[in-house]
Image (cartoon, grey):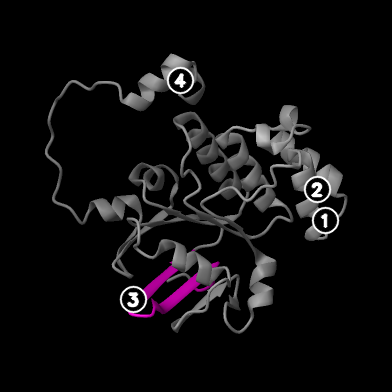
């Protein structure tokens, strides 16, 4: 186990009346890595994120984020994190730039207007910065939401199913941003029920099932859990996603 992980979880348990959502969850997340928590609907992924972000108190077990205990030191944990939920938490009345300035001021970041302009450029929203968010597409709102999470350079970011409801092009845009964030040293815990998403982004993957981690490791390590694959020569056909992107003109940019 990493001696100084960004996130450490041991024996985490949580129930809601008679429903046992988490029954003993253990994992570490290395600093500057992307960790994917994979599971079907109802597996407990969002409950784990809510506990780690201090929005929910565990029934038992311990969890630390950036070296701070989520129960004993919640204020210090909140100073170290940012959270992007399943639905974009943006104000539709404000413009994209105004959303970013508002969050920068709330986090007491110096020169919030400059920070907003820099993030609009970084996330490909400079041309839309003066428009009300109500006019944004789903992918643009998601990019703005993630940009808001980046304000203040938090060392740990939680992304709870960040591509929910996005079209293929927008999903690829979000994937690129996640890679860029991790490349800059940010630790990212990503929850998803999409296998491809975990495969493309994660340094390590944990599979959450019925309230506990049933498998964890790199993609190569998880593949070793299955029998060796048979070698067969088959004709491959383009996927529907490839056809869609090529048809709308996004295929070349993503290759």
Distance from the alpha carbon under mark 1 to that under mark 2: 6 Å
The percent position of residue 255, horizontal first and vertical second, equals 45, 24
Label 2 Cα neighbours within 10 Å, binned few <14 / some 14-19 / many ≥20: many
Depicted 21 relative to depicted 168: above or below: below
Q: CA distance from mark 3 to mark 1?
A: 40 Å
Q: Residue at 54% x, 34% y: name it.
A: 173
What SS does tag 4 mark?
A: helix
Q: Which mark is residue 238?
A: none
Res 251 label: 4
Marks 4 and 2, how far apart at CA? 34 Å
* Nearer mark to the viewer, of 2 and 3: 3
| Residues in magenta, as a range | 3-29
Q: Nearer the viewer, mark 4 or mark 3?
A: 3
CA–CA distance between discs 1 and 4?
39 Å
Q: Residue 213, position in %: x, y?
A: 32, 67
Query: Which of pointers 4 and 3 lies earlier in the amino acid sequence?
Result: 3
SS class, disc 3: strand
N-term mark: 2 or 3: 3
Tell me the residue that label 3 is attached to: 20
Mark 1 vs 2: CB contact within 8 A: yes
Contact, mark 2 vs mark 3 (Cβ under 8 Å): no
Q: Residues within 10 Å of mark 1 (few under 14, many from 20)?
A: some
Q: Secondary structure at mark 2?
A: helix
Precedes in sequence: disc 3 or disc 1: 3
Q: Which label's residue is closer to the chain start, 4 or 2?
A: 2
Asked whether the residues under the numbered discs 1 and 4 touch, taking CB atoms below 8 Å apart as contact, a structural biologist would say: no
- Give the labeled residue for mark 1: 105
Circle 2 residue: 101
* Structural distance between the alpha carbons of marks 2 and 3: 41 Å
Q: Nearer the viewer, mark 3 or mark 1?
A: 3
Q: Position of residue 41 (x, y in %)?
A: 35, 56
């Amino acid at each position: 186990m990493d001696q100084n992980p960004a996130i450490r979880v041991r024996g985490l348990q949580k129930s809601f009346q008679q429903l046992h959502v988490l029954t003993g969850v253990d994992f570490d997340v290395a600093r500057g890595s992307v960790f994917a928590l994979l599971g079907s609907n109802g597996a407990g992924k969002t409950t784990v994120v809510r506990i780690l972000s201090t929005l929910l108190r565990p029934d038992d077990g311990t969890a630390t984020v950036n070296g701070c205990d989520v129960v004993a030191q919640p204020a210090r944990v909140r100073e170290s994190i940012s959270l992007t939920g399943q639905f974009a938490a943006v104000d539709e009345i404000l413009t994209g730039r105004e959303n970013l300035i508002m969050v920068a001021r709330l986090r007491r970041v110096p020169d919030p207007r400059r920070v907003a302009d820099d993030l609009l450029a970084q996330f490909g929203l400079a041309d839309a910065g003066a428009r009300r968010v109500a006019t944004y597409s789903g992918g643009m709102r998601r990019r703005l939401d993630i940009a808001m999470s980046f304000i203040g350079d938090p060392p740990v970011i939680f992304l709870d199913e960040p591509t929910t409801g996005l079209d293929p092009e927008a999903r690829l845009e979000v994937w690129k941003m996640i890679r860029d964030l991790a490349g800059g040293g940010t630790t990212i815990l990503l929850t998803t029920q999409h296998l491809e998403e975990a495969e493309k982004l994660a340094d390590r993957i944990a599979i959450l099932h019925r309230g506990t981690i049933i498998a964890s490791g790199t993609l190569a390590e998880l593949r070793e859990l299955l029998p060796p694959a048979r070698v067969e020569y088959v004709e491959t056909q383009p996927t529907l996603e490839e056809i869609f992107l090529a048809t709308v003109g996004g295929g070349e940019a993503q290759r």
